[in-house]
Structures are given as C-alpha cells and as structure tokens.
Image: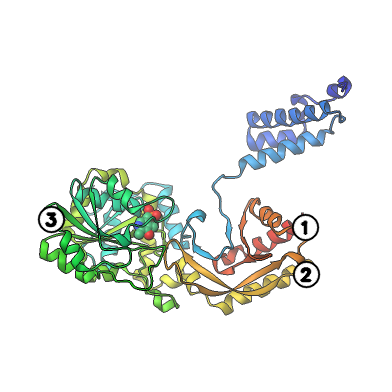
Amino acid sequence: MPIDQNQLRLLPSVEELLLTPTGQKLIEHYSRPLTVRAFREALTLGRQEILKGTPCPPRDFFLEGATRKLEEQDLPHLRPLINATGVIINTNLGRAPLSATALEAVARVAHGYSNLEYDLTAGERGSRHDHVSALLCEITGAEGALITNNNAAAVLLALSTLAQGREVIISRGQLVEIGGGFRIPDVMRQSGCKLIEVGTTNRTRARDYANAITTETALLLTVHPSNFLITGFTESTSEQELVALGQKYSLPVMHDLGSGCLLNSEHYGLAHEPMPQESIQAGVDVVCFSGDKLLGGPQAGILVGKANIIKQLAQHPLMRAVRVDKMVLTALEATLQHYRRGEAERHIPVWRMISARSEALGRRVDRWIEQLRDRGITTRRRIGQSTVGGGSLPTETLPTILLALEAHDSQKPLAELARHLRMRPVPVITRISRDTLLFDPRTMLEEQDAEFVQALIESYYT
Ligand SMILES: *Cc1c(COP(=O)(O)O)cnc(C)c1O
C-alpha cells in the first residue's frame, strides 16, 4: 500500500503539543519528562494509523490519548476497592479492613517520630513489643506476648526456638495446607525440626502422642485445621489432655490457632471458633494466631503464652528478621483497645460485618434497587449467604440479602459487566451465579454505597 507522505507530514511535533493549554496543564501536573513521553507514545500510535492508510488524526487524538495515559499511570497499583463478594476475610482482597480509630492512630504515629523503641519513663532504649504485650496479656490471660510479621513467621520462630534439631509430635489430621501454599509440614522442616506424625487422619488420641514421646521430643504441637472440617467418625485430643501429657513429660505444648478469634463466635449464630483465651486457660504454653483474620487488625503474627517461653522466643536471632514496624504495632494496639473497651463489635469492621442483621442489609439493597430503577436498570432482592472466609469457620454461613442483576435485564453479557466493574478506578469485585450478578452488602462499606451505585450505572451503560 502506498504510504501517504502528506498525511505523515501533518503529524504535530512534540513541541507543538507541549505548547497547547492541555500540554501546559499536563506538564504542571505530571512533570515535563512524563508528558513528553506520553505525547511520543500518542504520536507513535498516530503514525501507525497513517501507515495503515487512515488520514492523520486530529490534534485532540494526541492530547486526549496522552492525558488518558498519564491518568492511568498515576493511579496507584495497590488501591482500595469495593468487596461485593460476601466473603468477609478475603486474603486476595487484603483480609481485614481496619477500624477508623486504628487508621487515625497509624497516621499520627507514622507522620513523625514515636517512642517505638524508647522507654519514656526511664529515658532509655525500650522494646517495641511493650506497646501491645500488656494489652494482649490482659485480653487473653497470658503471661507474655510477642508480635511477628504474620502467623507463618510466628510458627517458624516458635518451632525454630523450641525444637530445632529435635522432634515435634503432631496429629496426622492436622498436617494441613492453609492456602497460598503454606503447608504445616514444610514450615516444620524449614525450622529444622523433625516431624513425628501420630494417629490417623480422622482420629488421634492422647495415647498416640504418649507412645511417640522419646528423649528427642521437644514439643507437642496442635494446629487448628482452619479451612476444612473432618466430620463423621472422628476423635481428637483436647488441649487439656495434651497439657497433662506435656506436664508429665516436661514438654511444652504449642497451639497454632490460625484465626485468633477473641470474641465468642457462637454469639453471632456461628459454630464455636477456638479462642486464644481458652487455650491459655487450658494451660497451653504458647499459642499463635494472625492479626488480620478474625482479630480484625493489621497483618501480624501474635504469640501469647508462658513468660519463660515468650522470653526465649524474643531472644532468638530470627526475631529480628520477623519483627513488625511501627505502623503495624500502632494499628494492632488500637484494634486491641476496642476489645479491652468491649466495643469490638461496633468498631472493628470484621465484627461489624459478622453482626450485621439481614433487615439492615435488606434496607440498603432496597435503596440501591430504587436508585437503579430511576436510571432504568432492573435489579431485585435475593436471599443469600455470606461467609467468614480467611480459613475460619469453613462450613458456616450468615444469612444475607443480595442485590441481583439477572442476565436478561442486562444489555451486555454479565461477564463483561463484571469486567467493567473490575476495571474502574475504584474496582467493584462481584460474583456471577447462575446467570445472575450478585452483590452482597455485608462486605461493602456503607460509605462506599454512592460510589457503588454510580459504578453500576456507568458500567451498565458503557
Ligand atoms: C492462616 C493460618 C496461618 C498463616 O497465618 P498468616 O498470618 O497468613 O501467615 C498459619 N496457621 C494456621 C492454622 C492458619 O489458619
């Protein structure tokens, strides 16, 4: 095809584009080098079009193209979104949202200097763990507490400290994979201890542990299976039995609880999720759990237990590698304060979502339906189920009211609509079930309601 040199000559120069009012505005906002680069890219696109035989695009093509590109690149890659999935603790979506109080505390501490490792009373070096350990001891009844980067790090630190080069006894039914490839047997190997599996997948008795104890045994470990349930002909050894065994043979007992549920889940219509307080009460030596699962705080690993064991862990060289920063500690302290003040259910988003009533959720859905109807979009109420997620209470659900958009009420395929919603500056993450697009208000923050309705309207009509 003959190339139209005249059309190529019509292409504006980068200089010309920079001198336009739009060009000047872009330079001011995004800097000159980034604006130049964006214009060059737009010009390359224009040249390709001409080489395909189309006439030179108008000047606006380059100005708008560069503006769009610069806006896109300016959006943070990690950014807030609207979780309409109904899964409260969703690892892919950042797990637990923080309370407003926790966020304000983080902003105040992170903005300037703090007493992170400074003892204000003594006027000398202090420990970063002191800020939350007293609170954790008060809430769980433990003698000591320690914080790591996450619960996987807490398990690694505890096993490395207590059992390196020696044997750890664990039930076959608890050799679980938590998700994201975190497998208990792998962590045990990584920490240099030898895994002694006892019992069977479905039944492990105290006798099985007792029979496996040798002079090489360092620790009795029990792990909450978290994301699955063994039902039917089952038997597991209670914490009390393990503690009695540990005392008889002078062996420490460790419990990896996973979620760290500080409120009684039964009060919310859910099955009982084991609580750190109960393990401490039973006499378990060291208990670990996550900060961002049912606790509803920042990503962290929390270790609570006997003073002498916590002290040993704090002195292990790995501690330095798995320690947390001031933002995490601040968010954790503020979250724990909600529990101490007995206001967790009102202030911690995870618990506010768990305790939200269907009637209140239904009222929000009704408002959305009305607002969408005003814009010509037909949606309906649908009864559904939310889940806790985060590897906790795997078979439990909470009754909810969903907003449903059925395929025959949509002008475009639902998958395309869902993609549109995902690609927005504030993405909306939803799910499709049997030709219906579903939105669960339980996991959507109320302050995002207006943004959500607008998102649905725009995605529907574009
Ligand atoms: C989730 C979980 C972990 C890992 O915790 P992270 O905080 O994600 O590192 C470890 N053990 C159990 C039993 C869990 O449920």
Judging from the image, what secondary structure is the residue with disc 1 in? helix
Whether tag 3 and tag 2 are in contact, CB under 8 A, the answer is: no
Q: Residues within 10 Å of mark 1 (few under 14, many from 20)?
A: few
- Give the CA distance from mark 1 to mark 2: 14 Å
Residue 64, position as x, y percentages in the image: 76, 39
Q: Is residue 22 left or right of residue 326?
A: right
Residue designated by label 2: 374
Residue type at mark 3 is Thr
Sequence-wise first label, 1 or 2: 2
Q: CA distance from mark 3 to mark 1?
A: 70 Å
| Of the image marks 3 and 2, the number of the one nearer the N terminus | 3
Tell me the mark number nearer the camera, choosing from 3 and 2: 3
Question: Is 119 above or below relative to 403?
Answer: above
Rendered view: 91 above or below 4:
below
Residue linked to disc 1: 461
Which secondary structure, mark 2? Answer: helix
Q: Residues within 10 Å of mark 2 (few under 14, many from 20)?
A: few
Q: Residue at x 70, y 57 (%)?
A: 417
Residue at 59 percent across and 68 percent down: it is 440
Q: Quadrant of residue 394?
A: bottom left
Q: Residues within 10 Å of mark 3 (few under 14, many from 20)?
A: few
Q: Regarding mark 3 in the picture, which secondary structure is present there?
A: loop
Q: Is residue 343 above or below residue 185?
A: below
Q: How many marks?
A: 3
Mark 2 belongs to which amino acid? Asp
Which residue is at a point 52% across and 55% down the rendered structure image?
93
In the figure, is residue 382 to the left or right of 248? right
Q: In the image shown, does 442 or 211 lie closer to the viewer?
A: 211
* Residue for badge 3: 214
* Quadrant placement of the C terminus: bottom right
Q: Nearer the viewer, residue 343 or 394?
A: 394
